[in-house]
Image (cartoon, rainbow, N blue to C red):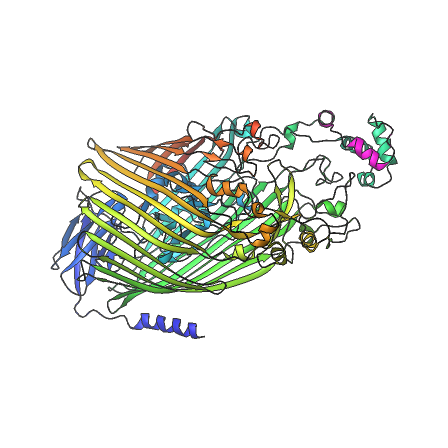
Amino acid sequence: MKENYLLKNVVITLLFMLPLAMVAQTIKGKVTDSSGGGLPYVNVIEKGTTNGSVTDINGEFSVTVESLPIKLVVSSMGYASKEVNVTNTNYLTILVNEDNSLEEVVVIGSRNPNRTAIDSPVPIDIVDMKELAASSPQVNLNQILNFVAPSFTSNTQTISDGTDHIDPASLRGLGPDQVLVLINGKRRHTSSLININGTFGRGSVGTDLNAIPAASIKRIEVLRDGAAAQYGSDAIAGVINIVLNESVNELALVVTTGANFSKNANGQTGGVDGQTTNISANYGLPIGDKGGFINFTGDFDVREAYNRMKDWEGTIFNLYNTVERFANDDGYDLTKLLDNDVSDVIQYANQAGINLNGATTKSQLQGVLSGDNTTAELAARGLESKDFNMRVGQSKVRGGRFFANFKLPLDDNGTELYSFAGLGSRDGNSAGFYRLPNQSRTYTPAYINGFLPEINSTISDKSLAVGIKGKIGEWNVDFSNTYGRNAFDYMIGNTFNASQGNASPTVFDAGGFAFSQNTVNLDLNKFYKNTFQGLGVAFGAEYRLENYEITAGEEASYTQYTATGEAIKISTQVPLLDFFDAARPGGSQVFPGFSPSNELSRGRSSIAGYLDLDADLTEAVSLNFATRFEDYSDFGSTVNFKLATLIKASENFRIRASFNTGFRAPSLHQLNFNSTSTIFDQNGDPQEVGTFANDSRAAQLLGIPQLKEESSTSFSAGFTAKLPDANITLTLDGYVVNIDDRVVYTGQFEGPGTGTELDNLLTQANASAASFFANAIDTQSKGIDFVITHKADIGANSRLKTDLSATLSKTEQVGDINASAVLENAGLVSTYFPEDSRVYLEEAVPRTKLNLTNSFTTGKFNIFLRNVYFGEVTEATTVVANQQVFSSKVVTDLSLGYKATDALTLTIGANNLFDIYPDMAEASFGNRSDGRFDWSRRAQQFGIGGRFLFARVSFNLK
């Protein structure tokens, strides 16, 4: 009640204490480009405040100020920011010149309202989405950033359960949960999915960037520096701020379609697959006469699956399957072959001409009939080995998203209401490992030739932010509430609970999970233009509520049964057996459902306060200091700080450096997720692995400590330089990030199999091994980021823009594994943090990426050429001898755009023009899993789709 009372008073203060200007004066004018034409949608802001306006369609503006003289800051993407001294109310004509995006005023990195990217004491990349939308082959946000921002990595995963449907993403080689995502400067909720299968980022929770339509975005600001002292948890690696579109009276309709035209398409036979279509529309309406607007974006896409597996090379049928074929052809009930009366087995074996060598008992028959008979059975059944292939490649996806962005100025003093919201739904389909007829997982009376189980996902995402900005005295005040929720539900198809026998359905509701977050922010800032050379003071508070839920599936989706149909609870109960007395696994295969014991709803709250000081001590030296206190209801409090400086050595050369401490609170997912999954090892052998929470009895028995926060220290230093005569801008930054108590996903702990308490806990979870989340290691990440931009005018109407950017990074474990004495005494330290986890952390994604982009515009034509260098990666496996290193590759993108009319642009092009693939898995390393994986599924550079050709039609009506 006390918090509600305080919030209510803040709102009342904002609404009723905004002061009226004593002597209001109105400045009018027009912003033009070099041709003299008016520029619409240009920001015209009174320096040091949020008071200002946006130019109209003719480039004209009107700003009311309290008194003169003042300075106006004029900025717009693609044009150099400009400051104009205003001493009277005469009509102004302001000329701005084209320049690179480093001159754009940015939201992140500092709360000083005057900071541009090039004047920031920390490195910030600006991604102009309008430019990319016209020429880039990629349409979803993860892939757009993967090919344009070298420090960013994200790839489509395969055979990884839910991770096939939400791509993990990282910054500077750190984890997906160590980068904070903002929208319009407000914290974005994370996904509900936690990555526990064999992918980069295993054990982490990221943000589902593909839930945000690219067409809704004006620009993306990528802060490549630790910022936990400014923005809180998750910002150890940096911050990605997505700035939404604000355009009005302009309809942008884009249709993009394409497919993989590759030598390895369609199971490596070549041709066309992976067809993709994306349709997006963006439109904005002006509201009022003070620059208000509401901007809408709708986005729909369809992506077909593709497969890169050629032929299954392992065994498929044994001699018992031959007996089954003869019995089935005779109309015999195959379930009767499974009992101890073996007379029918002998009868059909004799009909099949199988030499039983005098076998008459079940044990004797088991020895004979276990023999491989794949070649003969394939011929007899009219099948080929490729009929038993998996789908190794991208999942099938169908989804739609809707976003809105709203702002309504209430007066001429900077008071405004604002809001933005999103709603999206995505259905995915992927497949797991093929269940072969000669495996106990296949109940052959139902699937005589085995089956390929499928994961069908429904991912829903919704968000809403509402706020009000204004002034209290001379202070700028921003009060907001941001809510978001992500849910992931599983429907498992073409599958079977083998322990149920004939009673099993083939489709299961396996349950799901959801994560929601509500954040209340109060931010105040003021710019003292006469203190030093300018001083920005900002402080504020944040209150955040989070909730994580797991919902159980239907009973048969998670239960293992006995032969009499009883649910197994203890390890001494015997499950349904196959003919060879192997236990039939329970639950829906490919993804066992969540049980009532997994079901939960756990919440927590955090409260934070921060102070941010940004001073221009002299015209050449600026200093930024930030500190933040944050207290979590479930693990305690932390205090962090950041110190950064920028030195203007000359008009065109700046030196910058920063030092900060940071933290990341373990996510509610890591604290509470518990479930059982089917994990296949490097040989393709399945195991049911239960994930147990750290406060569980299983964790206590094994000596797994409870989770605590990650803590970090980081240092970065670099410079920015401009060569005006050559139209070149460049930045170079080096960094070191040390993280203590990093949360990882452990290896698999097995019970002794002697009926111990741990054995019974595993049985109750329908699992044979247990894994946990743990603060197992300390790490150090270091690297260098480099960006150079060049523009050149060629002739009267041609321009060439060139961007070269690169990142060289390295992450490695430092010190010993942080294992408890119980684990050390039991000799389980190598299971606590296994070798494959080290590779996922250090070598499974490129540590070196270079991007060279050229955009040439002449008349009505635009040519876009981009080359991306992806450094080497290593196969993530526990066997060191099997860790194949895959060499570096260069991927080329090319597109040609033609502006047919002012409203219509046609574009054709290619991603991966030369059909480049990663190195193939060599048989000598033993990772091909009998032909399943000709390319690694554990080490990702740029995917295995091959050449993608696309065509795009863009309508822009004003």
| Residue at 51% across, 40% down | 157
Q: Residue 567 is drawn in which quadrant?
A: bottom right
Q: Which of 447 and 732 lies nearest the eye of the viewer?
A: 732
| Residue at 64% across, 58% down | 597
- The correct choice, above or below, for 23 with respect to 821 in the image is below
- The correct choice, above or below, for 581 with respect to 483 in the image is above
Q: Residue reaching furthest front?
A: 825
Q: Position of residue 720 (x, y in %)?
A: 25, 44
Q: Which of 89 and 147 lies nearest the eye of the viewer?
A: 147
Q: Which of 28 and 694 lies nearest the eye of the viewer?
A: 694
**Predominant secondary structure in magenta?**
helix
Q: Position of residue 604 (x, y in %)?
A: 50, 63
Q: Which of 858 and 562 lies nearest the eye of the viewer?
A: 562
Residue 55 seen in render: no
Q: Position of residue 758 (x, y in %)?
A: 67, 54
Q: Position of residue 867 (x, y in %)?
A: 37, 32
Looking at the rendered image, the quarter that the N terminus falls into is bottom left
Residue 731 seen in render: yes
Q: Residue 792 is drawn in which quadrant?
A: top left
Could you tell whether 506 is left or right of 164 in the image? right
In the image, the segment drawn in magenta is 358-378
